[in-house]
């Protein structure tokens, strides 16, 4: 694997620090085939990039879901070999969407460990504005399902106002889509099944993964088309 242009080139120590794991863990994952080998640079030093960080984040998410190392190995083996950091992040988002709500109160050091990075006061303020953390007695109440997402947004070159506006757009439209889909499915459920809680729960369990995958896929494609059109217009203007 080669590092992308502009991607961070990290030593194994830097990669471990960014991912919130030990160097020994990184090496172990490498020997198990869970991580691609590093790019060997001058003086035979191994360099790691965004794909390694994204894969470590995905492994951590799978562990949070209670998967064994053997199960994680099988999961990763089924993924296409040429996935980039963006694709891996999408997979991690899908996995994280099944995690139960997890809000904990943690000290600052643990907050940084869970985020996988050092956090300045400005970073914590931005995370609080995004609804990811809030000050509490003994540290911070943090939504663990949103923490990695929020930490990633800290590096996005957008103003806090733009990020919050985007968050509101996503919440508004996702709620509207969930409501309309719920109404649609409700109309398909017979009166007998509607009174049968187990039948309704069974329908939800079968449909939810399909709906989430469909939403992610259609949104990803639509966003790519919008960005392609926007960048094409910028290039023409230039």
Image (cartoon, grey):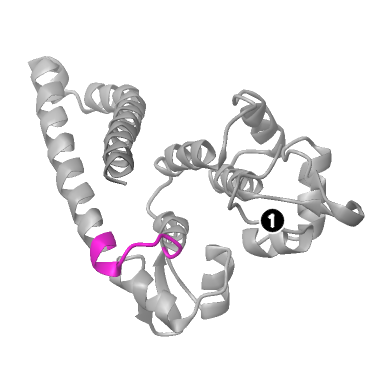
Residue at the image point whose x is 47% and y is 57% from the top = 148
Q: Position of residue 181 (x, y in %)?
A: 16, 28
Q: Nearer the viewer, residue 80 or 40?
A: 40
Side of 145 relative to 75 (left or right): left
For image coordinates 22% across by 25% down, the residue present is: 200
Identify whether 66 is placed above or below 222. Answer: below
Specify start and end residues of the magenta stretch as a single range.
154-163
- Would residue 162 be counted in the magenta stretch? yes
Q: Secondary structure at mark 1?
A: loop
Outermost right residue:
43
Q: Quadrant of residue 39?
A: top right
| Secondary structure character of the magenta stretch overall | loop
Indicate whether 113 appears above or below 57: below
On screen, residue 156 versus residue 159, left or right, reads right
Left or right: where 154 falls relative to 201 = right
Residue 156, image x, y percentages: 41, 60
Using the image as rendered, state which of residue 12 and residue 191 is in the foreground. Answer: 12
Q: Taking 31 as reference, is 215 left or right?
A: left
- Measured as percent of width and height from the top left, residue 236 is found at 29, 39
Q: Quadrant of residue 81?
A: top right
- Identify the residue shown where x is 57% and y is 42%: 62
Name the residue beneath numbered marker 1: 9
Q: Residues within 10 Å of mark 1 (few under 14, many from 20)?
A: some
Q: Nearer the viewer, residue 216 or 203?
A: 216
Number of numbered labels in the structure image? 1
192 vs 16, nearest the viewer:
16
Classify the position of the N terminus by image quarter. Answer: top right
Percent x, y of residue 8: 63, 56
Indicate whether residue 24 is drawn in magenta: no
Q: Is residue 150 above or below residue 204?
A: below
């Amino acid at each position: 694997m080669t590092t992308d242009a502009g991607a961070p080139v990290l030593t194994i120590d830097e990669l471990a620090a960014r991912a919130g794991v030990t160097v020994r863990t990184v090496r172990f994952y490498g020997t198990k085939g869970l991580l691609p080998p590093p790019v060997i640079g001058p003086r035979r030093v191994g360099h790691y990039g965004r794909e390694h960080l994204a894969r470590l984040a995905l492994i951590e998410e799978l562990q949070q879901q209670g998967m064994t190392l053997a199960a994680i190995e099988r999961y990763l083996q089924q993924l296409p070999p040429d996935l980039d950091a963006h694709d891996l992040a999408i997979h991690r988002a899908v996995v994280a969407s099944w995690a139960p709500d997890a809000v904990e109160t943690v000290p600052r050091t643990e907050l940084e460990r869970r985020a996988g990075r050092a956090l300045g006061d400005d970073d914590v303020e931005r995370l609080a504005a995004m609804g990811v953390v809030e000050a509490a007695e003994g540290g911070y109440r943090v939504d663990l399902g949103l923490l990695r997402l929020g930490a990633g947004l800290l590096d996005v070159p957008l103003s806090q106002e733009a990020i919050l506006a985007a968050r509101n757009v996503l919440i508004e439209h996702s709620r509207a889509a969930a409501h309309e889909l719920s109404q649609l499915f409700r109309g398909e459920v017979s009166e007998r099944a509607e009174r049968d809680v187990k039948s309704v729960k069974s329908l939800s369990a079968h449909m939810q993964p399909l709906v989430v995958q469909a939403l992610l896929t259609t949104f990803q494609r639509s966003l790519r088309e919008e960005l392609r059109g926007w960048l094409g217009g910028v290039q023409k203007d230039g």
